[in-house]
Amino acid sequence: MKILLYGGSLNTVSRSGVGEAVRHQREALERLGIDYTMDEREGYDIAHLNTIFPDSLRMARRAKRQGKKVVYHAHSTMEDFRNSFIGSNLAAPLFKRWIMRCYRSADLLITPTEYAKGLIQGYGVKNPIVSLSNGVDSAFFAPDAEAGRRFRRKHDLADDAKVVLSVGHYIERKGVLDFVELARRMPDHQFYWFGYTPLYMVPAKIREAVETKLPNLHFPGYVSRDELRDAYCGSDLFLFATHEETEGIVLLEALAAGIPVLVRDLPIYADWLEDGGTVYKGRSLDKFERGIRGITERSLPDLTENGRKLALGLDLDAVGRRLAELYGMALHSGGPEKLQAQILRPEL
């Protein structure tokens, strides 16, 4: 069995969660010794696609014409396309129709969570679909005191400085407006947002937020994987104020790194992230502020051991084994009905 991890237009999303998901897939296949290529000119049995650009749809159709199986990772939904870039809300219905066309080209669809699976099934997509976490490299994103000290030295932060971290694109959906307002409300905390989006792509209110001048608000931009690991280890908590997600790889990284996590209370996190058990949750600025202070002042219980344990269950080794099973099912299923029956089993 040989897998084509299709890389067309991948450079466009290399600094996004989709790009990181593909890196995870490569790592998982290499760990398991599964033969794969990113060159469509080589022979392969299954084409695995992750992006929804026109070239990916063409690749899927070409693979089907050649009698190959197509596995499509459904990372994108209409819901998480909204409130992102200029014009995204107007274009959202068209985006939905486009991704439905892409996803219907697959023999098997994979979504990161049951929540995302439900959204796509709600669009009317009938293809066999299974949820499988994008996973996390829990050996790399692990508690590391020296990594934390490197982060604080680089940014000239005192040992007792209270640091709030977030990671993502500069888009409204990711919660950047709330992040800036919390920095304004909490001058005794340092707020660091890692990630980058060209400001010409986002609405004026997002540009203004990112350009806000506060002594405790920092937008260092996109950083390397090593620097991001150091930031997790050197911060007091990870704030994920996102309004919509299909999973959130950075959330898994923070949990694996063993720092407290405060998330927006969203339906996607209702079943698998327990408020006060693995993370803390909030819905409003006031609740976020209380949560931040409770964590940094240590008046709330430490949940990091529970969060790390959850992340370990989604390590790339476990995710890779399940992915290999799904490849085998797609290759030998004999049809969509049989494949759907095979995948109805406990999922990661």
Image: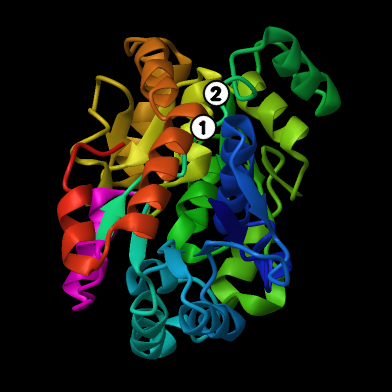
Residue 163: percent from left, percent from top: 60, 26
Specify whether residue 125 is painted magenta.
yes
| Quarter of the picture holding the C terminus | top left
Q: Residue at x 67, y 64 (%)?
A: 197
Is residue 202 at all visible to an observer of this figure? Answer: yes
Q: Residue at x 41, y 30 (%)?
A: 314
336 on left or right of 49: left
Which quadrant of the view contains residue 56?
A: bottom right
Which quadrant of the view contains residue 334?
A: bottom left
Q: CA distance from mark 1 to mark 2?
A: 8 Å
Q: Which span of residues is magenta-colored? A: 113-128
Residue 66: percent from left, percent from top: 52, 80
Q: Amino acid at mark 1?
A: Leu
346 on left or right of 40: left
Dot 1 and dot 2 residues touching (CB under 8 Å): yes
**Nearer-the-camera pick, 179 or 80:** 80
**Numbered label attached to residue 138:** 2
Residue 104: percent from left, percent from top: 33, 79
Is residue 110 at all visible to an observer of this figure? Answer: no
Query: Dot 1: what SS?
Result: helix
**Numbered label attached to residue 246:** none
Residue 123: percent from left, percent from top: 22, 77
Q: Residue at x 25, y 71 (%)?
A: 127
Q: Which residue is mark 1?
A: 316
Q: Amino acid at mark 2?
A: Ser
Query: Dot 2: what SS?
Result: loop
179 on left or right of 36: left
Task: Classify 245 as above or below 161.
Answer: below
